[in-house]
């Protein structure tokens, strides 16, 4: 799922950067959104495997807090 998301993200960025008009840009933004969708949940799901069960609660808290940061 993560690899598919990365592929969609890459195709979306390429479609956004190509000078093909508004339709290409709109398609690019849509593909970027669909590409990002599976990455964050997959990373959260893999956290106990990467950091261990004893540390996973703290790490997931940091991940969730970082995901909700909005620049001022």
Image (cartoon, rainbow, N blue to C red):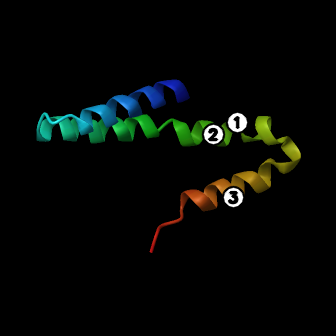
CA separation, marks 2 and 3?
Answer: 13 Å
Is 58 left or right of 35, judged from the image as shown? right
Residue beneath disc 2: 43
Q: Answer left or right for 62 relative to 19.
A: right
Residue found at x 67% / y 38%: 45
Quadrant of the rendering where the C terminus is positioned: bottom left
Q: Quadrant of residue 48?
A: top right
Residue projecting furthest to the bottom: 72
Tag 3 or tag 2, which sits nearer the N-term? 2
Q: What whole-number distance in Å separates the C-alpha atoms at marks 1 and 3?
A: 14 Å
Quadrant hosting residue 61:
bottom right
Instruction: Tell me the residue that label 3 is attached to.
Output: 62
SS type, badge 1: helix
Q: Are marks 1 and 2 in contact (CB under 8 Å)?
A: yes
Of pointers 1 and 3, the one earlier in the residue sequence:
1
Mark 1: few/some/many CA within 10 Å (<14, 14-19, 20+) = few
Question: Which residue is rendered at x = 71% and y = 52% of the image?
Answer: 60
Residue 1 visible in this rendered orientation of the protein: no
Of all residues shown, which one is farthest toward the left?
A: 21
Whole-percent x, y for residue 37 in the image: 46, 39
Quarter of the image where one finds residue 63: bottom right
Disc 1 target residue: 46
Please rate how many residues cluster around mark 3, counting C-alpha atoms within 10 Å: few if below 14, some from 14 to 19, many from 20. few
Q: Where residue 11 sits in the image (x, y, percent)?
A: 34, 28
Which residue lies at the image location 45% right of the left edge and 40% below the top edge? Answer: 36
């Amino acid at each position: 799922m993560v690899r598919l998301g990365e592929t969609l993200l890459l195709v979306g960025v390429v479609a956004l950067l190509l000078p093909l008009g508004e339709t290409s840009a709109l398609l690019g933004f849509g593909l970027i959104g669909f590409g990002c969708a599976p990455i964050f949940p997959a990373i959260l799901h893999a956290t106990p495997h990467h950091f261990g069960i004893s540390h996973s609660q703290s790490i997931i808290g940091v991940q969730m807090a970082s995901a909700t940061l909005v620049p001022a």
